Amino acid sequence: MPAAKRLSPEDQQRVDRYLTSGVHQTDRKPFRVWRLFAFIWLVLGVMSAISYWLAINHGVI
């Protein structure tokens, strides 16, 4: 396999300029771990309640 080719200084300057221009960046809200945790527990609780209700109605419990 041939060795990896390096960019010329002019091409590297273009790449650096593009990466610092902000074109590829987006503003995001901060990640909220506890909100995700609460949502997962809520979904889990609802699914458990539905399965428990179905089990009672079908005479399993």
Image (cartoon, grey):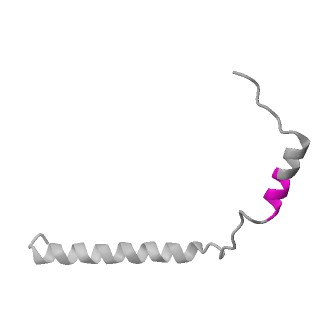
Name the main secondary structure of what is drawn in magenta: helix
**27 and 35: which one is in front?**
27
* 36 with respect to 52 (left or right): right
* 8 with respect to 43 (left or right): right
Q: Residue at x 58, y 72 (%)?
A: 33
Position of the C terminus by quadrant: bottom left
* 59 with respect to 15 (left or right): left
Q: Residue at x 69, y 21 (%)?
A: 1
**Residue 46 at what x, y percent from top left?**
32, 78
Q: Which residues are magenta?
A: 15-21
Question: Is 16 in the magenta?
Answer: yes
Tag count = 0
Q: Residue at x 27, y 77 (%)?
A: 49
**Residue 7 at what x, y percent from top left?**
83, 39
**Residue 2 at what x, y percent from top left?**
73, 22
Q: Is residue 47 above or below residue 5?
A: below
Q: Residue furthest right?
A: 9
Q: Residue at x 87, y 39 (%)?
A: 8
**44 and 60: which one is in front?**
44
Q: Residue furthest top?
A: 1
Q: Quadrant of residue 5?
A: top right
Q: Quadrant of residue 47?
A: bottom left
**Residue 45 at what x, y percent from top left?**
35, 76
Q: Residue furthest left?
A: 59
Q: Is residue 13 above or below residue 51?
A: above
